[in-house]
Image (spheres, rainbow, N blue to C red):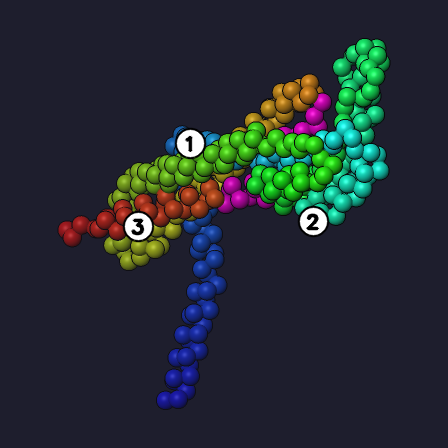
Amino acid sequence: MSSNLHSSGLSQRDTLIRRLLTLPIRHLQQAVGSLGDLWRTPFTSVMTTFVLGISLALPATLHLFVKNAQQVSEQWDSASQITLFLKLSTSEKSAQNLVKRIKLYAEVNEVHYISAEQALNEFKILSGFGQSLAYLDKNPLPATILVTPTQRSSQASAANELLAKLKQEREVEQGKLDLEWLTRLEAMAQLIEDIVLGVALLLCMSVVLIVGNTIRLAILNQKDAIAIMKLVGATDSFIQRPFLYSGFWYGIFGGLLSWLAVSLLAQYLTGAISNLTDLYQSNFQLQGLAFNEALLLIAFAVILGLMGSYISVRKHIRAIEPNAD
């Protein structure tokens, strides 16, 4: 009797191992079979893929816009630079001592000193009134100190606090910090990010509905075949699997199409942006989707495709039952 129990245990173990080994093969067969089903309905498959790809390309393009806007704002960190105008009575030695004191501030990253003579020479060159300025008895321009805060202190509130501290120095006549336009830019960038998130959520919902409706039509077209499969003992999970793989393929192809569309759009805009930046002597370069971002886009499309197909098969395949007669 013990030998029978031992042989029964071995048989069950062999059966379990055989099932585990054949499971990937079965999944691969159904994945390839679902791809063949898409190939046999080219018009529906292409239209669904294009709708899915275009729907995902719009939020991906908006993400690209936000990404490049952040790159531009990072290049404008120096816009939080503080300009200190010294009193006309300040001597060169006192100005240099002030520069040394400011460099000791924990909030300060860099200090650049412009003497009154340097300021006057630059003004002569830029204004074109060099000959007229030569008749002046004394230099009307004060010495200037340009203070660049650290990254942490470059925000509006921290930069204003630093400006208030610097204005308390006895040599400082006036301090200037123009952060109003940068604050507006940050608020606009935040608004655009919120818009991108809202649009992305709406389009993701539409993608799930589109894939779900496409899978629903495929299920209804194979309603009789599904009923026969249930009659011969096929489980719901076995019947559902090809349709789930169809959603997977829709996600793959839709994600690839959206990545291609965004890349072509970025390439198209690069030329126009280059012409614009050349006029302003800027070295800005439009950044496309990075490789990890492209993979994330495709993975997200696959998840949406699987969600749409899963919702559809869970509802419709269970509703199909073979006739009793």
Give the vertical position of 22 relative to 157 (above or below): below
The kind of residue tagged 3 is Arg
Inter-mark Cα distance, 1 to 3:
23 Å
Please identify the quadrant where the N terminus is shown. bottom left
Is 144 magenta? The answer is no
Front position in the image: 126 or 196: 126
Between disc 3 and disc 2, whose residue precedes? 2
- Secondary-structure class at tag 3: helix
Magenta-colored stretch includes residue 296: yes
In the picture shown, does residue 22 fall above or below 287?
A: below
Residue 322 position (above or below residue 76): below
Given residues 156 and 235, the one toward you in this image is: 156
Q: Which residue is mark 3?
A: 314
Q: Is residue 195 left or right of residue 64?
A: left
Neighbour tally class for label 3: few under 14, some 14-19, many 20 plus, Cα within 10 Å: few
Element carrying mark 2: loop
Residue 95 drawn at (x, y percent): 80, 37
Q: Which of disc 2 and disc 1 is earlier in sequence?
A: 1
| Circle 3 or circle 2, nearest the eye | 2
Hey, which quadrant is residue 129 in on the image? top right
> For the point 42% across and 34% down, which residue is it?
199
**Label 1 amino acid?**
Val
First to last magenta residue range: 281-299
Crowd class of label 2 (few under 14; some 14 to 19; many from 20; radius 10 Å): few
User: On the image, numbered disc 2 is attached to which residue?
Assistant: 106
**Residue 194 in the image: above or below residue 8:** above
Q: Which residue in the rendered view is the most extreme toward the front?
A: 89
Residue receiving disc 1: 51
Q: Is residue 280 visible?
A: yes
